[in-house]
Image: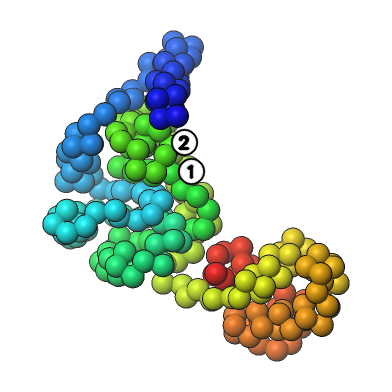
Amino acid sequence: MEASLDQLARRLEEVVGELRGIPVDVTRLEDGEQVKQEITRLVATSRELRAMQPLGSQEQGREEQRSRRQVLDALARGMRMRTVVHASVLDDERRLARLKELHAAGDLHRVVDEPLQQLLVFDREAAFVRITPVLRSPGALLVRQQSLISALIDLFEQTWARAREVTEPTVRLSPREREVLALIAEGRSNTAVARTLSISEAAVGKHVAGVFAKLGLPSGDDVNRRVLAVLAYQRGVTR
């Protein structure tokens, strides 16, 4: 499987290079140490970093301390950083503590629940993506082609715009409450939700009331509260 993905990545590079004869400035970095060296060099000279991280930092011990110091030093000299991470990071106390420390120092973080591919974009000059879109796969593609970098920046900005602040509190719902809210988000009435889940309409009403209470929605117009609950669900505030 890995071999076939590797062959596909190579073929895609060839195809892109052949399209209309346009030269594509993409360098294949097979060695992980070479990738780290290139990133370290760019961190030292760039003014802005946009990043997407599927599961936060995988580094530990001295490597984590070195990476953390590198980020803090870059922030101290004025580098702007924004990072989008996957919500699973919130379940790891060590990673969450590091994320909050960096966020407070100026590496602004936002969270999404959807799958992410790892991405680093330095200024508008260089970007790193994995050779194969598989978590922890070795190597990276170093992209300097301006048209590709613009597309990657657009992807980042769209993801950033719909992500939620890492400091925004999350609300824990029961499995049944999550099911009910997911169906409400599809536009279903309490009657339709009850029919889908094979429970009574009264039970649905109880679960909906529980969701409202956990979200801290004030009593009032139920239609408005349903809209606010759905918005919270769509933003990933409920878990």
**Do the residues under discs 1 and 2 have CB atoms within 8 angstroms?**
yes
Whole-percent x, y for residue 163 in the image: 50, 59
Position of 232 compared to 92: left or right? right
Looking at the rendering, in which quadrant would you find the C terminus? bottom right
The amino acid beneath tag 2 is Ala
Q: Residues within 10 Å of mark 1 (few under 14, many from 20)?
A: few
Is residue 235 depicted above or below 16 in this figure? below
Position of 234 compared to 54: left or right? right
Q: Please report the residue visible at 31 percent of the width from the left and 48 percent of the height from the top.
A: 49
Q: Quadrant of residue 25?
A: top left
The amino acid beneath tag 1 is Leu
Q: Residues within 10 Å of mark 2 (few under 14, many from 20)?
A: few
Q: Please report the residue visible at 45 percent of the width from the left and 12 percent of the height from the top.
A: 18
Looking at the rendering, in which quadrant would you find the N terminus? top left
Question: SS class of the residue under badge 1?
Answer: helix
Using the numbered discs, state the Cα–Cα distance from disc 1 to disc 2 in whole angstroms: 6 Å
Whole-percent x, y for residue 232 in the image: 60, 70
Residue 38 visible, this angle: no
Q: Quadrant of residue 142?
A: top left
Q: Which residue is denoted by mark 1 in the rendering?
A: 155
Frontmost residue, 198 versus 46: 198
Frontmost residue, 3 versus 64: 3
Residue 185 visible, this angle: yes
Q: Please report the residue visible at 36 percent of the width from the left and 66 percent of the height from the top.
A: 92
Frontmost residue, 115 versus 218: 115
Q: Which residue is denoted by mark 2 in the rendering?
A: 151
Whole-percent x, y for residue 108 in the image: 35, 61
Q: Quadrant of residue 213?
A: bottom right
Is residue 106 depicted above or below 214 in this figure? above
